[in-house]
Image (cartoon, rainbow, N blue to C red):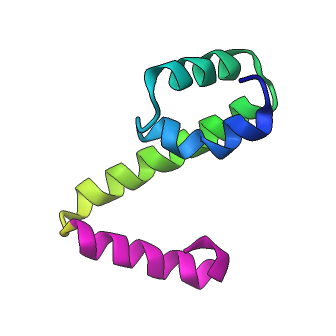
Amino acid sequence: MSDCREVLEQLWEFLDGELPESEAAEIREHLSDCAHCNPQYEFQLGLLDALVKAYAAHEVPRPEFVQRLKSALGAIGPDLT
């Protein structure tokens, strides 16, 4: 899988550990060499890390946290929720 579009389309599943190992290995290999995809990967990884820290810091039930996140994203733009 050397197609950037395919890698970027599967990036969230990759970050969530939802891909089969063979696909995850291909994405890791692509990211290690691709100057186009790597910045997007780093951004999404940082965003995921910030969300995890925010969730842990507020100690709210997950459904409530998800609803708050959707509300915040909806305020930014309807396409984000």
- For image coordinates 19% across by 69% down, the residue present is 60
- Image quadrant of residue 30? top right
- For image coordinates 24% across by 64% down, the residue present is 58
Does residue 65 appear to the left or right of 78 in the view shown? left
Counting from the top left corner in percent of width and height, residue 37 is at 74, 33
Q: Which quarter of the rendered picture does the N terminus lie within?
A: top right
- For image coordinates 62% across by 79% down, the residue present is 76
Residue 52 in the image: above or below residue 59: above
Counting from the top left corner in percent of width and height, residue 51 is at 41, 55
Q: Is residue 77 visible?
A: no
Main SS type for the magenta part? helix
Counting from the top left corner in percent of width and height, residue 29 is at 64, 15
Is residue 77 in the magenta section? yes
Does residue 12 appear to the left or right of 37 in the view shown? left
- Region of the chain picked out in magenta, as a range: 62-81
Does residue 27 appear to the left or right of 50 in the view shown? right
- 55 or 16: nearer the eye? 16
Q: Is residue 5 visible?
A: yes
- For image coordinates 50% across by 43% down, the residue present is 13
Residue 30 in the image: above or below residue 4: above
Does residue 81 appear to the left or right of 55 in the view shown? right
Counting from the top left corner in percent of width and height, residue 53 is at 33, 50
Q: Which quarter of the rendered picture does the C terminus lie within?
A: bottom right
- Image quadrant of residue 68? bottom left
- Image quadrant of residue 49? top left
Is residue 28 in the magenta section? no
Residue 39 in the image: above or below residue 56: above
Residue 40 in the image: above or below residue 62: above
- 39 or 33: nearer the eye? 33
- 6 or 72: nearer the eye? 6
